[in-house]
Amino acid sequence: MLLVGLANLLCFRVGTTVWDGSLVLSKYLVNTYGPQGLKGKRIIELGSGCGITGIVAALLGGHVVFTDITGLDLLRENVQNNLSSLQLETTDIKQYSWYTHNTQHTTHNSCNKA
């Protein structure tokens, strides 16, 4: 069960959409690797959002590091609600921006009022 926070929906924040690409990649992982097919593999998910692809990778046995810029509380809740305690031992959640130092990251969000 994936959760989407009401406050995030109202403010159009990250982690509120299950993108088609994440579903396609998740299905690819399941069909290509099968149960425990990622056992022992190290995986980093850049821009995890709600975490669906990383959750699937962890369910297939992968050691997953979920990353995103914001929305980590909702991501953490989704990961905890969808993985066993044993699977949680092989996961980590980190705040990370994959933008280069030459790229500016601008957030257009009505909820980020100073």
Image: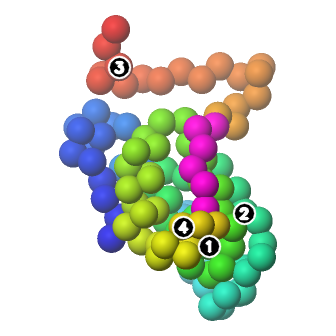
Q: Nearer the viewer, mark 3 or mark 4?
A: 4
Q: Please give the name of the residue rendered at 34% of the width and 8% of the height, measured from the top-left corner.
A: 114
Could you say which quadrant of the image residue 33 lies in? bottom right
Which amino acid, by three-letter code, is at mark 2? Ile
Mark 1–mark 3 distance (CA, rounded to whole Å): 32 Å
Q: Earlier in the sequence, mark 2 or mark 3?
A: 2
- Which one is earlier in the sequence, the residue at label 1 or at label 4? 1
Q: Residues within 10 Å of mark 4 (few under 14, many from 20)?
A: some
- Name which of mark 4 and mark 2 comes first in the sequence: 2
Q: Is residue 92 magenta?
A: yes
Residue 18 visible at all? no
Mark 2 or mark 3, whichever is nearer to me: 2
* Residue neighbourhood size for the residue with mark 3, other residues' Cα within 10 Å, grouped as few (<14), some (14–19), many (≥20): few
Instruction: Look at the image and give the residue range highlighted in magenta.
Output: 91-96
Provide the residue designation for mark 1. 57
Q: Amino acid at mark 3?
A: Asn
Label number found at residue 43: 2
Q: Is residue 94 above or below residue 88?
A: above
Chain-order first, disc 1 or disc 3: 1
Q: Amino acid at mark 4?
A: Leu
Q: Position of residue 21 (x, y in %)?
A: 55, 63
